Amino acid sequence: MKRFSQIELAKQVGVSSSFISQLVKGSKRPSWKRAKQLASVTCTSADLWLDGTPEQIKAALAGEKACACASE
């Protein structure tokens, strides 16, 4: 799984890096549509972005979760 910086992820999803920071801290949750975009870019599940703990989200950004999507 690819590693992502918050800035890189923000650019790919079309949001601010402060929004990604808030997601990582657990102070904000994305909409379903945004969660699906985040999941698609990071090769994770939308549920991670909607219900995951800050630790789980940080691990996903660090590339520590197995990729569940098809190989490129």
Image: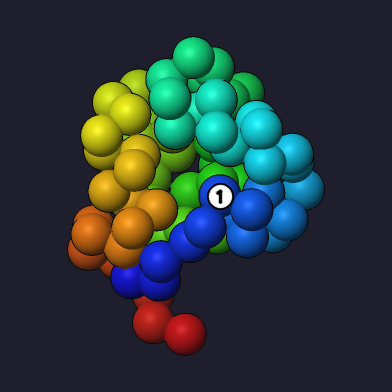
Residue 34: x and y, percent?
64, 35
The residue shown at (37%, 32%) is 47
The residue shown at (65%, 30%) is 19
Relative to the observer, which residue lies in front, 43 or 27?
27
Relative to residue 30, is residue 60 drawn left or right? left
Relative to residue 12, is residue 47 drawn left or right? left
Relative to residue 61, is residue 33 drawn left or right? right
Q: In the image, is residue 18 above or below residue 72?
A: above
Residue 30: x and y, percent?
58, 25
Quadrant of res 69: bottom left
Circle 1: element type? helix
Q: Is residue 68 visible?
A: no
The residue shown at (63%, 60%) is 8
Residue 56: x and y, percent?
26, 38
- Looking at the rendered image, the quarter that the N terminus falls into is bottom left
Residue 7: x and y, percent?
64, 53
**Which amino acid type is shown beneath numbered disc 1?**
Gln
Relative to residue 72, is residue 17 drawn left or right? right
Q: In the image, is residue 38 above or below residue 66?
A: above
Q: In the image, is residue 46 above or below residue 51?
A: below
Q: Which residue is mark 1?
A: 6
Question: Crowding at label 1, few (<14), some or many (≥20) Cα neighbours within 10 Å?
Answer: some
Q: Is residue 11 visible?
A: yes
The residue shown at (52%, 58%) is 5
